[in-house]
Amino acid sequence: MVRTFIGWTVVGLLLVCQPAQAGSSAGKAGPSNGPSKSGAPVATVQPSAAQPSKEPPKPVMQEVTVEQVRLTLQRYVEKQVEGKVGEVQVRLLNLPDPVTVPAGLLLEVRVADRGLEEGLGRRIFQIALAVDGTQVQTLRVMAEVSATAEVVTASRYIKPEETIQAEDLAMATVQLPALVHDFVTSLDLVVGKRAVRPLRAGTPVRLSAISAPFVIKRGDQVTIEVKRGGLLIQASGTTKTNGQIGQSITVTNLDSGKEIRGQVVGPGVVRVGF
């Protein structure tokens, strides 16, 4: 009887202790999301706090754009032709894209100063790229350089030897053939001049196409003067050619019938050297 009692007592103690241990283990595992398929509680693990993201690495290269190079060339050419033309246009023809250089605080795009000996049209430029004051690359760039200006044009057909009036002219913006040209840019330089060749309507007036008007025309009767000191001798004559002020022409002396050379000094007056 005593052995039986002791045996049942041990079994009872074991049954009492087992639930406590299970509960203790479950408590250590943390909160449960509910029973599993087997009926036992399932433990979950709480996620750790998010770690702050690292800053992205700074770029070690930077790009030089086509527009940066074009604007640099534009400013360079504009400075070189200031006062000679109206507007300048620069169009790049062969710049590789993209161009990269080391990163830095200050990027400089400079043009090697070679002057404008080549004028307008296709030009080759040397472009220096510098980062923080140190030159890192040189580009050989081909560009098309063009320029425009406001010039005087004929508003109608003007025949040779016509005296040009203000109403015969207009101002227009035209493409220049070269930096050095003889297009007239002021109306005052043309009004009152005579055309030495035909001028078509709408075409620019060139300096070579106009001249001072004749103040004496062929066949005009003029006064021939011989002047020296206080001595002045005058005679009448007729001209053999047209003449501008300062020009030498041939005159026939009406008294002697001789032809002499004299200089036109004013309308109707020819002076002969003594």
Image: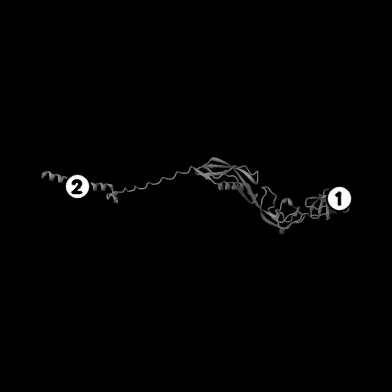
Determine crowd level at label 1: few under 14, some 14-19, many 20+ residues with C-alpha closer than 10 A: some
Closer to the camera in the image, 108 or 93: 93
Q: Secondary structure at mark 2?
A: helix
Q: Position of residue 42 (x, y in %)?
A: 29, 49
Marks 2 and 1, how far apart at CA:
159 Å
Q: Which residue is mark 1?
A: 259
Q: Is residue 129 left or right of residue 260?
A: left
Closer to the camera in the image, 63 or 243: 63
**Labels 2 and 1: the sequence-earlier one:** 2
Determine crowd level at label 2: few under 14, some 14-19, many 20+ residues with C-alpha closer than 10 A: few
Q: Position of residue 155 (x, y in %)?
A: 71, 57
Residue extending farthest left:
1
Q: Position of residue 161 (x, y in %)?
A: 77, 55
Q: Which residue is mark 2?
A: 15
Q: Is residue 49 left or right of residue 135?
A: left
Q: What colour scheme has been applied to the protein in the rendered image?
A: one colour
Q: Secondary structure at mark 1?
A: strand
Q: Amino acid at mark 1?
A: Glu
Classify the position of the N terminus by image quarter. Answer: top left
Q: Position of residue 134 (x, y in %)?
A: 53, 40
Residue extending farthest bottom:
167
Q: Amino acid at mark 2?
A: Leu
Callouts 2 and 1 close, C-beta under 8 Å: no
Closer to the camera in the image, 195 or 31: 31
Q: Nearer the viewer, mark 2 or mark 1?
A: 2
